[in-house]
Amino acid sequence: MIAHIQGKLVEKNPTDVVIDCGGVGYHINISLHTYSLLPNTDQIKLFTYLQVKEDAHTLFGFFEKSEREIFKMLLSVSGIGASIARTMLSSLEPKQIIQAIASGDVGTVQSIKGIGLKTAQRVILDLQDKVLKLYDLDEVSMILNNTNRDEALSALEVLGFVRKTSEKVVEKIIKEDPDASVESIIKKALKSL
């Protein structure tokens, strides 16, 4: 119903903001992730999600459209309400949540306050296929759980290579040879860098 609100930032707290839009102050609940992205300007725009319940209409705001989509996806899971979804987005970066769900990392999801083992498993069970399709992450589990990759990247960084550049090269090497040892990843990366 309300897709976004743009106006003057009147009040700013880690959990909520008030935006004056045409003389009306909108109280909007936010995550710590959104709070960290808020600019130091008067005029802001937040993408919103309006939750309608019998006893309240609550607005949730997000600096990035992608964060709002993850929030809505989390709400679709039985046992996850708006406050837990917001806590998830405050505890982890949206990208970390997506990767944890895609790779079936129950531990990361369960590490969030208010989420037990059963709920964490349900989140992964309900959303894993959606996340893999939406974010096109076919091989995310292979990449995420590869300690050789991390060790190789650290070594390349120590050798003075830029991490971003190294990551691209290392990802390509792992795609071609998922079982490559740390040494062979480094040797192949050095030839390409």
Image (cartoon, rainbow, N blue to C red):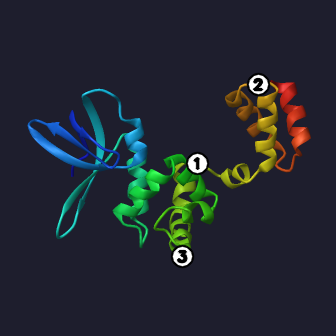
The part of the image, by quadrant, that contains residue 108 is bottom right
| Separation of residues labelled 3 and 2 (CA atoms) | 42 Å
Reading the chain from its start, which is encountered first: label 3 or label 2? 3
Inspect the image, locate mark 1, and give the three-letter code of the amino acid beneath it.
Asp
Q: Pinpoint residue 43: horizontal percent, then vertical percent.
A: 24, 29
Q: Which mark is residue 118?
A: 3
Q: Residue at 59%, 56% (x, y): give it.
A: 100
| Separation of residues labelled 2 and 1 (CA atoms) | 28 Å
The part of the image, by quadrant, that contains residue 87 is bottom left
Q: Is residue 116 left or right of residue 175?
A: left
Q: Badge 3: how crowded within 10 Å, few (<14), some, or many (20+)? A: few
Q: Is residue 163 left or right of residue 24?
A: right
22, 90: nearer the viewer: 90
Is residue 7 visible in this depiction of the protein? no
Residue under pointer 2:
161
Label 1: which secondary element = loop
The part of the image, by quadrant, that contains residue 152 is top right
Label 2: which secondary element = loop
Mark 1 and 3 residues: CB-CB less than 8 Å, in contact?
A: no
Inspect the image, locate mark 2, and give the three-letter code of the amino acid beneath it.
Phe
Q: In this rendering, is residue 137 above or below 111?
A: above
Q: Which mark is residue 157?
A: none
Q: Pinpoint residue 150: horizontal percent, then vertical percent.
A: 76, 43
